[in-house]
């Protein structure tokens, strides 16, 4: 599903954002990507959705080789992925429903399928009643749910969540995390970048930890069973 | 296509102020170009009026045979450059001179014999009223045996040639400069519209929109803005023309085709400006 093999990524002005990173996320898996700010989590995410190309090594995602992708293949890859960010990235001048529909419209889906699928995912994230609300009328947790609904509407095989709870209070964090777990339970692989240690401890999922661009810990490799919590010092604020 | 149209129209609704500003900027850029166009059009009309007066006159020897002259008239009218050829008899020439040269009327009255020769006055078709063509026609006329002399005001025709060349050069250079300024201003305006929506473009890309999909509404929007700007510019130009025509000097406005050309030019610049702005933006992000 996602495979990094000896990936290096250099910053444009020198220095390395990633150093020899290798890991594999299988179909249907849930993996946390942890580490300090600047550890390279976002770079890993950007390589997965082909916003960046590796300097060396190989990145494979959903059958695409990111190293050799032609620009016109990038949108095709992204339609197979759902992407969620800390800052939600919703269009302020569109309702929740329009924001979600937008992701389908760009794929030139039929109008009849769009409205049915949009309502289905809004129901899935518990926001069917607020379909006509604008982002400014929604709480942070609700906005993130709209963003998650948007990422789900194309029925992705992988959901990438880059600090999805970073802007949320504890209650909203729990709700959004539970939603991601439910999505994973229905078969979608989830890669969630976070530095929220409590969240990581709550669930028996795989943990991949980065430090200064290097992969320093992978629970599926370093410990049998793959459910061990990460080392505290690596994720402490 | 439907979606492209909807998105393009939505932008006008979502950012009405910026849209009005864009259309106004485009309109005024094209208005300046239009004003210059009006100057060119009127200058051309004035030159055409002057050109109308270009005439070649062949003076005939006394006693030229009537049949020969009639045949010559037919031959001359068949020249490709010639619009009309008119025979003026000696008597007609004298009558004209009496009417036109009032101050010499007494001298004319005392004449025992008509000193004026008969002539053929030749007008040339538009496009042939320059020195080269006029000289060529004059040379051919000299070939007729009963033609004594041929006059066409060489200096005057040469001056007209130079004036025409100057008007064309100024028209092209200044017109191109105005057009370039209009293109830059319009391009900048459209760039603002693209930057205003850069967040939206980034999100579109994240959810898997192709560059073509992102580009299309902008192109349509640019073309519509250019078209509207062009229409407003034509309206403003017409207002300016009406004022000048009424209070300053009698002038003429664009033909329908020229006006349509300016509107089309606006739409084209809008389209091109958008293509370049969006293309550069998409390449950079």
Image (tube, coloured by chain):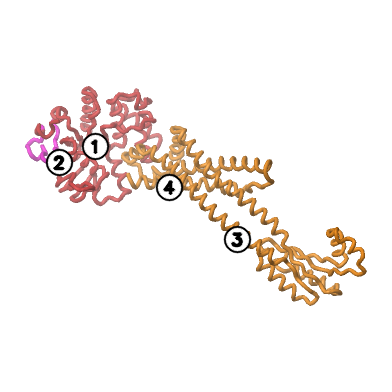
Q: Position of residue A73 (x, y in %)?
A: 31, 48
Mark 1 closeness class: few <14, some 14–19, many ≥20 residues within 10 Å: many
Residue pointed to by mark 3: B165
Q: Nearer the viewer, residue A186 or A43?
A: A43
Q: Is residue B263 magenta?
A: no
Question: Disc 1 or disc 2, which is closer to the eye?
Answer: 2
Residue A228 in view in this figure: no
Q: Is residue B41 above or below residue B161?
A: above
Q: Chain of mark 4?
A: B
Q: Which mark is residue B26?
A: none
Q: Which mark is residue A212?
A: 2
Q: Nearer the viewer, residue A181 or B27?
A: B27
Using the numbered discs, state the Cα–Cα distance from disc 3 to disc 1 in whole angstroms: 68 Å
Using the numbered discs, state the Cα–Cα distance from disc 4 to disc 1 in whole angstroms: 32 Å
Q: Position of residue B25 (x, y in %)?
A: 50, 40
Q: Colour of chain A?
A: red
Residue B159 in view in this figure: yes
Quarter occupied by the N terminus of chain B: top left
- Give the structural element (helix, strand or loop) at label 4: helix
- Number of marks in the rendered image: 4
Q: Position of residue B245 (x, y in %)?
A: 67, 43
Residue pointed to by mark 1: A160
Residue pointed to by mark 4: B275
Using the numbered discs, state the Cα–Cα distance from disc 1 to disc 2 in whole angstroms: 21 Å
Q: Is residue B170 left or right of residue A92?
A: right
Q: Colour of chain B?
A: orange
Q: Chain of mark 3?
A: B
Using the numbered discs, state the Cα–Cα distance from disc 2 to disc 3 in whole angstroms: 72 Å
Which residues are the magenta region?
A: A204-229
């Amino acid at each position: 599903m996602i495979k990094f093999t000896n990936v290096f990524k250099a910053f444009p002005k020198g220095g390395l954002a990633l150093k020899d990173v290798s890991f594999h996320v299988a179909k249907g898996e849930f993996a946390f990507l942890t580490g300090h700010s600047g550890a390279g989590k976002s770079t890993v995410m950007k390589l997965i959705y082909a916003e960046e190309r590796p300097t060396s090594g190989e990145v494979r995602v959903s059958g695409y080789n990111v190293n050799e992708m032609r620009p016109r293949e990038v949108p095709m890859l992204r339609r197979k992925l759902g992407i969620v960010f800390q800052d939600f990235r919703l269009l302020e001048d569109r309702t929740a429903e329009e924001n979600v529909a937008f992701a389908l419209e760009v794929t030139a889906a039929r109008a009849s399928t769009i409205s049915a699928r949009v309502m289905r995912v809004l129901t899935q994230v518990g926001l069917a009643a607020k379909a006509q609300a604008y982002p400014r009328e929604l709480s942070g947790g609700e906005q993130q749910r709209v963003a998650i609904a948007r990422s789900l509407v194309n029925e992705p095989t992988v959901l990438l969540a880059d600090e999805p709870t970073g802007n949320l209070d504890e209650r909203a964090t729990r709700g959004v995390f539970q939603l991601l777990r439910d999505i994973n339970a229905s078969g979608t692989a989830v890669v969630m970048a976070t530095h929220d240690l409590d969240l990581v401890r709550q669930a028996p999922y795989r943990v991949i930890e980065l430090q200064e661009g290097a992969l320093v810990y992978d629970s599926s490799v370093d410990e049998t069973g793959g459910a061990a919590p990460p080392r505290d010092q690596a994720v402490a604020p | 296509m439907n979606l492209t149209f909807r998105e393009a129209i939505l932008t006008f609704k979502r950012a009405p102020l910026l849209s009005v500003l864009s259309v106004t900027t485009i309109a005024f850029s094209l208005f300046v170009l239009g004003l210059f166009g009006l100057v060119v059009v009127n200058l051309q009309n004035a030159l055409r009026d002057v050109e109308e007066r270009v005439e070649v006159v062949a003076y005939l020897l006394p006693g030229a045979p009537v049949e020969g002259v009639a045949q010559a008239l037919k031959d001359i009218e068949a020249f490709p450059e010639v619009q009309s050829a008119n025979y003026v008899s000696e008597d007609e020439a004298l009558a004209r001179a009496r009417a036109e040269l009032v101050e010499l009327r007494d001298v004319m009255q005392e004449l025992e014999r008509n000193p004026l020769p008969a002539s053929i006055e030749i007008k040339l078709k538009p496009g042939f009223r320059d020195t080269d063509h006029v000289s060529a026609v004059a040379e051919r006329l000299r070939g007729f045996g009963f033609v004594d002399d041929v006059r066409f005001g060489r200096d005057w025709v040469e001056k007209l040639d130079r004036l025409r060349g100057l008007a064309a050069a100024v028209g092209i250079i200044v017109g191109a400069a105005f057009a370039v300024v209009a293109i830059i201003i319009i391009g900048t305006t459209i760039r603002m519209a693209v930057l205003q929506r850069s967040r939206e473009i980034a999100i579109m890309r994240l959810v898997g929109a192709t560059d073509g999909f992102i580009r299309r509404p902008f192109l349509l929007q640019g073309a519509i803005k250019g078209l509207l700007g062009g229409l407003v510019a034509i309206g403003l130009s017409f207002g300016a023309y009406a004022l000048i025509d009424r209070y300053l000097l009698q002038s003429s406005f664009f033909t329908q085709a020229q006006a349509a050309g300016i509107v089309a030019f606006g739409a084209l610049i809008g389209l091109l400006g958008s293509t370049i702005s969006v293309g550069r933006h998409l390449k950079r992000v």
